[in-house]
């Protein structure tokens, strides 16, 4: 056979944003070999008539740092057409790390990313110390899709400074020199860049601030200089919008200008109040016109928590009376909650202090039932506040009744942002901006509170098929998910269906494309639970020419590998 794989008769949407093309596509040796009519036979063939054929999607904001070690499958992402993920975001991760620092890194990751400490303690072999060692551990594994990794700031700071770093003391000149050298070495070993967070609500599990919070700009300058020394690397940063974009955005602009390295950051709209994100877009345009290469990462739907009795967050979790039943099996908790005395207590009690996510799960105006199929653009009339007003009861009563009616299985969507005035208009405007890319799926993290790694399926199903006059052209949406996202972080060898490019491909039935309701699975180390979410409509997902999923189910193929650093555009 002339080719390893031929995809026949599909509509090719190549990732460039250009017009669709009816043609065959052939793969040889893990690369796209030919595109055109009536190609020669392949050892394997896929009938793509009535389907679209796209590049594999690139998710630049995930936290699979642990899952990529203990699991061969990076789902939910790989269930939604994603073929490459970037991890180490927000400056949290597991390397570099001395044995004495492991508990601290677990404390940070548990708090910021909602990964149970026991899962990390038992699931990770910790057979590394330096960041290059960690990359080697990733390289030795097998998995369904490709992974790339940022050097995370919190481990780097603690590795360099010890307890002083964990306690957020200022870095000395010697500290800065060492962080710069370690960054250069990490880039040379294959780090995709450097990631950090300044976000005030990023807290460790013990309630303390993360090591990187409010780090001096001189420290970030020194680390970015390490990328400049290496001549490679992207800066990923979570800025603290709570302090004001006029204070925070100049930081990324300064770092990008000084280092000459590309940079990317998180951007979202509030649900109400003035549209500050427009000012951010203006500032980004100005910086890029001056020579910077800055992109904003935008969620294509509301940024939200999923709340439920079996999850990390729900409206009653911090109520004093709930503590007495919190450890009971679900059926016993529901039996206890049916008792009139317990009901009266939980409906009247004020929650105690706890993780900020829990208070957000009581913002009744922006909290909605999450049913099957899940609605990520619900009307205002579906909110818990609106339902309570219509019934003449308290919002707590509405939530309580739903939990009892569903035997504790009912889920809720708490829309934290990106749902300005109850619509996705602002999200659409940001998504279609030249300097923005879709992202923020957070796969591999927030196991009991967030399941947004399905955003790629949502983007196609909602914005290309169901948004009426506000539809995003399919070619544009595919470009956002593929070439545009890949190029933003230096992955020039993927995201485009052209000869010579990496053969990461999706074959999609757009008519059937849909997102399933998140489910709770218990497949983490130590029996830990997490949210998972599947999709329908992916006839095939292909990585390096190998079919890893066929008709929405995994195959035995595990071609995913570590991507070491930026990748050049094929000649």
Image (cartoon, helix red, strand yellow):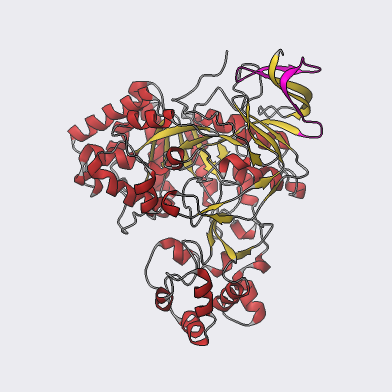
Taking the magenta stretch, the answer to whether it contains residue 100 is: no
Residue beneath the point at 58% across and 39% down: 78
Locate the C terminus by quadrant. top right
- Answer above or below: position of 461 versus 229: below
Is residue 551 toward the left or the right of residue 293 in the image? Answer: right
Q: Position of residue 120 (x, y in %)?
A: 37, 47
- Answer above or below: position of 322 versus 62: below
Inspect this view and state whether residue 192 appears: no
Image-quadrant location for residue 474: top right
Taking the magenta stretch, the answer to whether it contains residue 48 is: yes
Residue beneath the point at 47% across and 79% down: 346
Is residue 7 toward the left or the right of residue 109 in the image? Answer: right
Report the front residue among 490 and 103: 103
**Count of marks placed on residues:** 0
Is residue 20 toward the left or the right of residue 419 in the image? Answer: right
- Answer above or below: position of 273 versus 259: below
The magenta stretch is 27-51
Q: Where is residue 146 in the image (x, y as percent from the top left)?
A: 52, 31
Q: Where is residue 389 in the image (x, y as percent from the top left)?
A: 63, 78
Residue beneath the point at 63% across and 38% down: 81
Image-quadrant location for residue 372: bottom right
Q: Position of residue 331 (x, y in %)?
A: 53, 72
Report the front residue among 337 and 161: 337
Inspect this view and state whether residue 13 appears: yes
Locate the N terminus by quadrant. top right
Q: Which residue lies furthest to the bottom in this view?
A: 341
């Amino acid at each position: 056979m002339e080719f390893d794989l031929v995809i026949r008769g599909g509509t090719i949407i190549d990732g460039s944003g250009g017009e669709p093309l009816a043609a065959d596509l052939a793969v040889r040796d893990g690369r796209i070999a030919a595109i055109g009519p009536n190609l020669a036979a392949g050892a394997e063939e896929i009938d793509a008539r009535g389907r679209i054929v796209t590049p594999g999607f690139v998710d630049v904001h995930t936290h699979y740092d642990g899952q990529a070690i203990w699991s061969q499958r990076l789902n939910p992402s790989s269930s939604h057409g994603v073929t490459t993920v970037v991890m180490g975001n927000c400056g949290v991760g597991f390397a570099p790390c001395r044995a004495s620092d492991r508990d601290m890194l677990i404390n940070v990751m548990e708090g910021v990313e909602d990964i149970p400490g026991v899962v990390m303690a038992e699931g990770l072999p910790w057979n590394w110390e330096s960041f290059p060692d960690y990359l080697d551990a990733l390289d030795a594994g097998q998995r369904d899709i490709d992974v790339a990794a940022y050097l995370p700031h919190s481990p780097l700071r603690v590795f360099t400074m010890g307890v002083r770093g964990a306690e957020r003391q200022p870095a000395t000149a010697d500290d800065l020199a060492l962080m710069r050298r370690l960054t250069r070495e990490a880039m040379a070993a294959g780090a995709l860049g450097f990631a950090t967070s300044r976000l005030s609500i990023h807290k460790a599990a013990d309630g303390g601030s993360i090591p990187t919070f409010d780090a001096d700009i001189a420290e970030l300058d020194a680390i970015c200089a390490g990328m400049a020394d290496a001549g490679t690397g992207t800066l990923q940063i979570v800025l603290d919008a709570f302090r004001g974009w006029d204070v925070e955005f100049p930081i990324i602009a300064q770092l990008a200008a000084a280092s000459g390295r590309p940079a990317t950051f998180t951007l979202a709209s509030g649900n109400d109040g003035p549209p500050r994100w427009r000012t951010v877009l203006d500032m980004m345009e100005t910086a890029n016109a001056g020579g910077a290469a800055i992109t904003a990462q935008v969620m294509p739907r509301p940024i939200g928590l999923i709340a439920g009795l079996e999850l990390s967050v729900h409206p009653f979790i911090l109520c004093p009376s709930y503590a007495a039943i919190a450890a009971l099996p679900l059926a016993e908790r529901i039996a206890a909650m049916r008792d009139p005395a317990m009901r009266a207590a939980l409906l009247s009690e004020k929650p105690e202090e706890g993780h900020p996510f829990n208070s957000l799960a009581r913002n009744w105006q922006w909290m909605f039932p999450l049913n099957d199929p899940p609605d990520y653009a619900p009307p205002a009339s579906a909110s818990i506040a609106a339902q309570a007003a219509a019934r003449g009861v308290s919002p707590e009563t509405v939530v309580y009744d739903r939990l009892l009616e569903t035997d504790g299985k009912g889920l809720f969507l708490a829309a934290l942002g990106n749902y300005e005035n109850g619509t996705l208009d602002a999200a659409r405007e940001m998504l279609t901006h030249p300097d923005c890319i879709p992202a923020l799926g957070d796969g591999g993290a927030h196991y009991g509170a967030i399941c947004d790694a399905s955003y790629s399926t949502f983007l196609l199903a909602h914005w290309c098929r169901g948004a009426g006059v506000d539809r995003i052209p399919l070619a544009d949406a595919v470009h956002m998910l593929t070439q545009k996202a890949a190029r933003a972080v230096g992955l020039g060898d993927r995201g485009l269906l052209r000869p010579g490019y990496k053969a990461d491909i999706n074959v999609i039935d757009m008519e059937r494309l849909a997102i399933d309701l998140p489910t709770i699975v218990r497949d983490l180390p130590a029996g830990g639970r997490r949210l998972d979410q599947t999709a329908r409509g992916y006839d095939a997902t292909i990585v390096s020419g190998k079919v890893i999923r066929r008709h929405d189910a995994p195959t035995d193929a595990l071609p995913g590998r570590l991507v070491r650093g930026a990748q050049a555009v094929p000649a």
